[in-house]
Image (tube, rainbow, N blue to C red):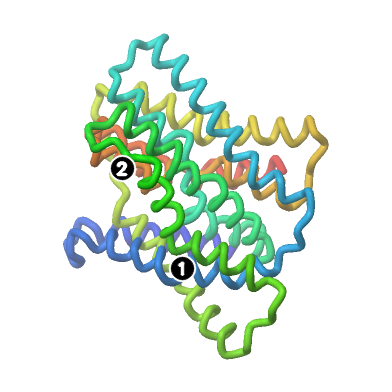
Amino acid sequence: MENFLLIFILLIFGIIIKPLKLFPDNAAHVLNLFVIYVPLPALVLLNIPKLSFSRELIIPVLLPWVMILLSVILIIILSKVFSWRRSITGGLLLVVPLGNTSFLGIPMIKAFFGESHIPYAILYDQFGSFLALATYGSIVLALYGSSKKPGIMDIVKRVVYFPPFISLILALILRFWTYPPIAVSVLQMASQTLVPVVMFAVGLQISFRLPRSVVSPMIWGLLIKLVLAPLAALAICSALGIFTAPAKVSIFEAGMGPMITAGALAIIADLEPELMASMVGLGIALSFLTLPVLFRFM
């Protein structure tokens, strides 16, 4: 509970600081880059070697793709029913299927489940959310966005050159070796900066603008992301009789708010920028209410 309270305080601190203009406009972007290049790779290198590989780990790898497929089907159906603009459909196809499973997910997993469960969250994020952003996300942007259509090599480069993914491959290679004490100390110090930096950065990025024209798509999008997706994940695992630690973490990750990076890409592609900003901002804020409820169901 103390960890959850700390996360909430850091988030509120970022929200309060934002209108005071004490930091440059690109402060959140710089902090996000720091997280991607320093604490997140360190966390991966520290925790992945602790994994005992078994069939249980299939769940964190496959479940995010099932959630993506479910979200896509629901959005396309709703788009037909409500005759949403093409830009609304494209934007929702980016931010609803892709969750904030790293920046928000890892601190939340640590707060609710403990540090021992972080490796499962990393698997869900790297083989699910991030890989989907690089592949599925690129396809959505190519079909709906105004940006340049990415080629196969562009997608491959996004995956291969992403620092946490490089760390993941390195950690898998090094899992049979013991790190020297100095390396462990450096990695621990670097990884400990993740939660305070990322939650402050998230606070700086939250937007609560609510244009009337996008209220309905936003409500449906958040309903799918925060309620229907985790309930579907819970139902799938229950039907299969799987209640392992990796499964519980995967269900919890399925309930994270929309991915900040996906929202940023949608905004850059001019896919209803105000809707995307509101989806990400409110999604993160509402996660602090929905995740504790989801945790009680498990």
Q: Do labels 1 and 2 touch, CB within 8 Å? A: no
Tell me: residue 117, above or below residue 298.
below
Q: Is residue 285 visible?
A: no
Q: Residue at x 72, y 51 (%)?
A: 57
Instruction: Depth check: give the residue in front, 5 or 25.
Output: 25
Q: Is residue 138 visible?
A: yes
Residue 116 position, x and y percent, is: 68, 65
Residue 82 position, x and y percent, is: 37, 11
Quadrant including the C terminus: top right
Q: Residue at x 49, y 68 (%)?
A: 41
Viewed as shown, does residue 200 lie left or right of 77?
left
Give the residue pinned by disc 2.
265
Viewed as shown, does residue 28 lie left or right of 77?
left
Tell me: residue 70, above or below residue 209.
above
Amino acid beneath label 2: Leu
Residue 211 position, x and y percent, is: 24, 29
Q: Which mark is residue 67?
A: none
Viewed as shown, does residue 59 lie left or right of 288?
right
Specify few, some or many for label 2: CA neighbours under 10 Å numbering under 14, 14-19, or 20 or more: many
Q: CA distance from mark 1 to mark 2?
A: 23 Å
Viewed as shown, does residue 268 lie left or right of 256?
left
Tell me: residue 40, above or below residue 259.
below
Q: Residue at x 47, y 77 (%)?
A: 190
Instruction: Depth check: give the residue in front, 28 or 111.
Output: 28
Tell me: residue 45, above or below residue 118.
below
Quadrant including the N terminus: bottom right
- Mark 1 or 2: in front is 2
Amino acid beneath label 1: Leu
Give the residue pinned by disc 1.
194
